[in-house]
Amino acid sequence: MVLKHIGVASAARITGIVTAALGLIVAVLYLPILTLLSLFDGSGESFGMTMGFAFLIIFPILYGLMGFLIGAFYAWLYNIVAERFGGLEMEFEDAG
C-alpha cells in the first residue's frame, strides 16, 4: 500500500493536540523548578508559583498552536512531494 495523500486539516488537528499535551507535561515539569528558583532570587515563592501556574496555561496553548501549524505545513508539503515522487510505502498484516 502507498500513502498518497494526507488530510491537511486532520494532520494539523492531531499534531496540535499531541503537542499541546506535550506542552502541559513541560509546564508541569517547570512548576517546581520555577518555585525553587523564586526562593533563591528573592522574588518570593508566590511569584514562582504564579509563573508556574501561568505556564500550565501558556505552554499547552503555544505548543498546540505551533504543532497545529507545523502539522498542517508538513501534510501540505508531503502531499506535494508524494504527488511528484510517490508516497510512503507501507506494509500491513492482519493481527488475527
Image (cartoon, helix red, strand yellow):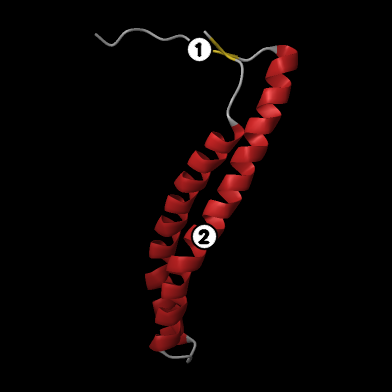
Residue at coordinates 36% horizontally, 7% vertically from top-left? 93
In the image, what residue type sits under mark 2?
Ile
Q: CA distance from mark 1 to mark 2?
A: 33 Å
In this rendered view, identify the residue nearer to me: 13 or 88: 13
Please indicate whether residue 33 sits to the left or right of residue 9 in the image: left
Q: Residue furthest left?
A: 96
Q: Which residue is mark 2?
A: 61
Residue at coordinates 52% horizontally, 7% vertically from top-left? 1
| Residue 46 location (% of width, % of height) | 40, 87
* Element on which disc 1 rests: loop
In this rendered view, identify the residue nearer to me: 76 or 37: 76
Image height check: is 75 above or below 90?
below
| Quarter assignment of residue 70 | top right
Image height check: is 63 above or below 8?
below
* Element on which disc 2 rests: helix
Q: Which residue is mark 1?
A: 90
| Residue 22 location (% of width, % of height) | 45, 51
| Quarter assignment of residue 52 | bottom left
| Residue 14 location (% of width, % of height) | 48, 40
In the image, what residue type sits under mark 1?
Met
Residue at coordinates 42% horizontally, 58% vertically from top-left? 24
Residue at coordinates 28% horizontally, 11% vertically from top-left? 95
Contact, mark 1 vs mark 2 (Cβ under 8 Å): no
The 10 Å Cα crowd at callout 1, few under 14, some 14 to 19, many 20 or more, is few
The image quadrant where one finds the C terminus is top left
Give the number of the disc on residue 68: none
Reading the chain from its start, which is encountered first: label 1 or label 2? 2
Image height check: is 91 above or below 18?
above
